[in-house]
Image (spheres, grey):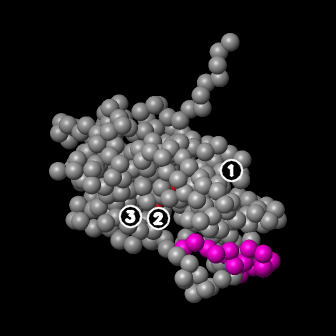
Amino acid sequence: MSKPASPAYIGRFAPTPSGYLHFGSLVAALASYLDARAVGGRWLLRMEDLDPPREMPGAQDAILRSLETYGFEWDGPLARQSQRHDAYAEVLQRWLSQGLAYACTCSRKQLEQHQGVYPGFCRNAGHGSENAAIRLRVPELEYRFIDRVQGEFRQHLGREVGDFVIRRRDGLYAYQLAVVIDDAWQGVNAVVRGADLLDSTPRQLYLQELLGVAAPSYLHVPLLTQPDGHKLGKSYRSPPLPAEQARPLLLRALRALGQDAPEALLELPPNAILAWASQHWQVDRIPRTLSMAEAQLR
Ligand code: GLU
Ligand code: ZN
């Protein structure tokens, strides 16, 4: 009797349209793309447009255009989190009624001295959920996983994170909730993304546990600085990736990921560069840290 086939690889790229794609997001997109294509896997695209006030007008189109210009081809239709509110609401209501989540009316000021770890003030207050943030109770447990590049990562949810927000007071759903519901809904079983999300992963493992879904594998690539030296954070609004620089920037991104990128690739169109790179993809060459990644670029 033949064994059941292992589930095929399903990866994704999930940009937030608060700005254009920058070099760091290109590196993350490239890593997730190559990791999927190297094994003949699927690569999905999901727009994480959860936060209209922070959305930059035109960013969604610009992101799609950049991805196309840089040779990326995604499978299936683009998913948009702005279309998924019913799914988030359903989970949230269930957890509220089960007492796993609760309403929090604390002001930012009240929480100021607690270094980001919510002290549980509203845990048993029984506030109504109107006009309140919704927090998820976390267990007093350490969550751990083995990242494919970063190695073992551990975090104690009670001590280091605390009950965290899954719907904001203004009614917007939190990234942590939406990302886990949607990865499960889309069947994603391999997450490749920037290392800024490493310390979100234990919260996501807990959310998966509550949803009863399997955790995907995780690979967090090092964060990079702009060629001009700017740290690539959420606050720095970078210009769009230049269309006419697609080939050299793809080579640079490959090198930042520790991959071979012979100069001869500059002769190829972007999608052929990606095809070549997916055939030569070597996860064990991805540097763990920014300094190592930047050394590759010299
Ligand atoms: N939307 C997130 C970001 O742009 C990425 C989410 C993820 O890959 O889990 O930072
Ligand atoms: Zn509170």
Few, some or many C-alpha atoms within 10 Å of disc 2 (few <14, some 14-19, many ≥20)? Answer: many
The amino acid type found where label 1 is placed reads Glu
What residue is rendered at 71% in x and 51% in y? 211
Find the distance from the CA under tag 2 to the CA under tag 1. 28 Å
Residue 207 on image: x %, y %: 65, 55
The answer to whether residue 67 is visible is no
The image quadrant that residue 156 belongs to is bottom right
Q: Work out which quarter of the rendered image holds the N terminus and state it.
A: top right
Return the residue nearer the eye: 95 or 139.
139
Q: Position of residue 123 (x, y in %)?
A: 74, 74
The disc at residue 17 is: 2
Secondary structure of the residue carrying numbered label 2 = loop
Query: Looking at the image, which is closer to me, 171 or 203?
Result: 203
The label shown at residue 20 is 3
Residue located 29% across and 61% down the image: 225
2 vs 1, front mark:
1
Please tell me the numbered disc located at residue 209: 1
Do residues under tags 1 and 3 come within 8 Å of each other at their CB atoms?
no
Query: In the depicted view, which residue is nearer to us: 35 or 120?
Result: 120
The amino acid type, in three-letter code, at marker 3 is Tyr
Q: Which mark's residue is nearer the viewer, 1 or 3?
A: 1
**In this rendering, is residue 165 above or below 21?**
below
Secondary element at image label 3 = loop
Q: Quadrant of residue 259?
A: top left
- Left or right placement of residue 106 versus residue 198 in this view: right
Task: Say few, some or many: other residues with alpha carbon within 10 Å of mark 1 (under 14 / 14 to 19 / 20 or more).
Answer: few
Q: Residue furthest right?
A: 97
Q: Amino acid at mark 2?
A: Pro
Report the magenta residues as a range: 116-133
Disc 2 beta carbon < 8 A from ligand 1?
no
Q: Report ligand 2 position as a quadrant.
A: bottom right
